[in-house]
Image (tube, rainbow, N blue to C red):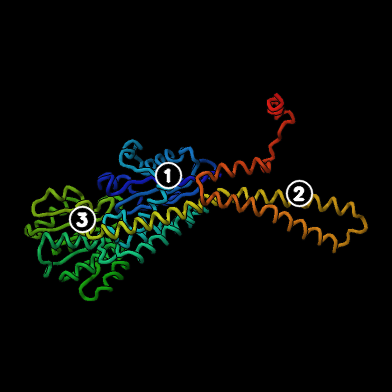
Amino acid sequence: MDKTIYLLGLNHKTAPVEIREQFALTNASPDQLGLVDRKEDIREGLLLSTCNRVELLFVGSADGSGEEKALQCWAGYCQRDPERLRPYIYSYRGLDAIRHMFTVASSLDSLVVGEPQILGQLKDAYKTAVDCGLTRTVVNRLMHKAFSVAKRVRTETRIANAAVSISYAAVELARHIFGDLQGRKAMLVGAGEMAELAATHLLATGVDEILVANRTLSRGQELAQQFGTQARAVCFEDMFDHLPEVDIIISSTGATRTVVQAREVKTILKKRKNRPMFFIDIAVPRDIDPDVNQLDNVYLYDIDDLKEVVEENIAQRQDEAERAREIIEEEVDKFQLWLRSLELNPTIVDLFDQAESLAQKEIRRTLKNLGDQATPEVEHALETMAHSLSKKLLHQPVTFLKRRAREEESAQEFISLTRRLFNLDNESVPSESHAFRHKQGND
């Protein structure tokens, strides 16, 4: 069976936030996309969607027909034209897809190189795919390998040392704008991991108080309690009543539409007597209406604006990133060997099945010839001898095939030759098929 690995995606390097939010699959599961159809092109699949990337990993036939289907499923789910999406996507197959997945898991492809959040997001994506019953041998093995590669990279390099997060970069951006954050009041819209990290960094920089506005109030209260008296939760519906007292707003919800509109901020500015407000929108799709940035004394930044802040962080990690890429190449080679062995397994199974079938046939014929002498002890001895003989006869051919699969690029050639040599596919060969060769030899 053909098991070619494909990866289709877009990220912060190939598409601006305006495109990423149009094709975000934040709340989608792979089965909702209709990506996997085991009767057709795509037999296994996984969907990863974060604020900086959307990627579809799947296994299909070697003719590449699954790539177009994946593109159609993706755009269709977002109710948009596939041609709008096509210019921004990247597509990998085979070893390139494996290498990219290892690179993503190791946080080398992240906006903030070395940040740890992507590995957790990838594990969540894998769990969702497993829960939906959409993974099998190849995706299961690939994802577990990706997790171990990420662990190895973090253990054997210093890529994660002093690594920052998107939330840290957002707070740094606020510090650049305001200078000193002491005495400022901030609001977090959303109470996920991003908000939790942002709260930690805001308090470390001297912010006086943090308000947490989350659609589920209990989750907002839970987050606020982690930070003692310096944080308190407010009802999401009352968020605009509290905004006039807030200087910094960091928003990171999973909403599919904007939750703060320009007209609402305009009203709030009047209540603040036009004192500056600073919005950082790290959600994709974005939470804050871009028109907010047109208002006087309002400063709005989205996740793409954080790139300048993290460039210095990337430069500091270049040497470690090179070492990490060497580790990834080693692991890609190992995974390739496993894939080749996967191609070989059906042929090995067929060889032993054929040997077992022939052994049983000969045992039955011998027992019939023995007549009354075929006691249970004799039958057991014959079966033991036949099984032992078939295993020893196949040991060398199987060892040869496994060695070729590890050492050479031509594993498929040897597999095909073995299947023909032992007629494992039960092909009927006409008796006159070699007559022409005999005739040539005689001439």
Q: Are marks 3 and 1 in contact (CB under 8 Å)?
A: no
Mark 2 Cα shell of 10 Å, populated few (<14), some (14-19), many (≥20): few
Which residue corresponds to the image point at 67% horizontal and 49% vertical from the top-left? 351
Q: Determine which quarter of the picture holds residue 280.
A: bottom left
* Disc 3 from disc 1: Cα separation: 29 Å
Q: Could you tell me the amino acid type at mark 1? A: Arg
* Disc 3 from disc 2: Cα separation: 67 Å
Residue 93's disc number:
1
Horizontal and vertical percent position of residue 283: 27, 54
Q: Determine which quarter of the picture holds residue 174.
A: bottom left
Q: Could you tell me the amino acid type at mark 2? A: Leu
Which residue corresponds to the image point at 89% horizontal and 58% vertical from the top-left? 374
Q: Could you tell me the amino acid type at mark 3? A: Glu
| Extreme residue in the left direction | 273
| Extreme residue in the top direction | 443
Residue 311's disc number:
3
**Kind of element beneath mark 1:** strand
In the picture, which quadrant includes the C terminus? top right
Horizontal and vertical percent position of residue 138: 50, 52
In front of the other: 417 or 189: 417
In the picture, which quadrant includes the N terminus? top right
Which residue corresponds to the image point at 69% horizontal and 40% vertical from the top-left? 426
Drawn side of residue 6 relative to residue 266, left or right? right
Report which residue position mark 2 lands on. Answer: 358
Sequence-first disc among 2 and 1: 1
Drawn side of residue 363 relative to residue 64, left or right? right
In front of the other: 345 or 189: 345
| Extreme residue in the front direction | 443
- Asked if 144 appears above or below 263 in the picture, the reply is below
